[in-house]
Amino acid sequence: MLLAVAGVALLAAGAVFAACGGDDDDSGPEPTTAATKAAPTAAGVTGNGSPQSALGKKINQAKIPQDLANGQAIGKADAKVVVEMYEDFGCPHCLDFTASIEPVLMDEYVATGKVQLVYRYFPLHQITAAAAIGAYCAGEQNQFWAYHRLLFIAQAEANERKGPSLNQAFAPDGLKQLASDLKLDTAKFGDCISSDKAVTAVQADLKSANDLNLPGTPSFVINGKVTDGPASAAEWRKLLDGLLK
């Protein structure tokens, strides 16, 4: 079964990419899988896999307040601050953000009801457009954030050659394996990743990114305003605390 990514790839060709880019990687070891059943914690759920890369381990250990998840959004709907994160699942800068900054935002701002995070698809390549479609389809089964975790762990493993390359991990079989690891309905997931509905959803976010003239990934729109993303957790705290006053 083929992913319906051609339309996404065509739209992506018109975007301006500054922060992340490069050719899709087709090298690396043969695919391996990691257990991904979520383990409960006080503030959410962690991954239950066994990634070998440093960043993969950090992402696996991060807590996600799954009870506040609603598709691509996570956090209370009436949160005072809404942070839209335009990202690409193959972007190393997005990977760093997901491993080092996002857990702080989840713990200190999302789980406490202060901030809502919204993931927006901004794929830079056809292979990462496929990953975005997979994430959308996981979201159709209310597992977007758990799947989001697995996709970034897959990137971390590929970058350190401790797992399959992105071309393997983000291929249809790789995406369906991640869905199986999360115990999703794999038949529904398979139908979804080849559907026009999934492509349309990814295209909508990508068009929004282009309309906003976002320079690359990750980019942030906070309370409707394009905002330069702070470089550290301390700077994020300063920015968000100022908006929450």
Image (cartoon, rainbow, N blue to C red):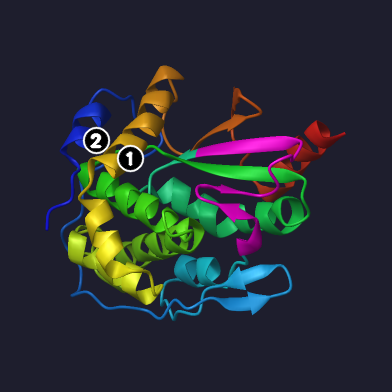
Which of disc 2 and disc 1 is earlier in sequence? 2
**As shown in the figure, which amino acid type bears the numbered disc 2?**
Val
Closer-to-camera residue (84/73):
73
**As shown in the figure, which amino acid type bears the numbered disc 1?**
Pro
- CB under 8 Å between discs 1 and 2: yes
Mark number displayed over residue 8: 2
Residue holding disc 1: 123
Q: Residue 87, image x and y in percent? A: 44, 42
Q: Which residue is pictured at 15% across the width and 58% down the height?
A: 26
Question: Which residues fall within the magenta stretch?
Answer: 65-85
Q: Is residue 76 magenta?
A: yes
User: Disc 1 or disc 2, which is closer to the eye?
Assistant: 2
Judge whether residue 63 can be spotted in this image. yes
Residue 162: name its quadrant: bottom left
Query: In the rendered view, would you say 95 is above or below 238?
Result: below
Q: Which residue is pictured at 77% across the width and 45% down the height?
A: 114
Mark 1, Cα crowd under 10 Å, few <14 / some 14-19 / many 20+, is many
Could you tell me which secondary element the residue under label 2 belongs to? helix
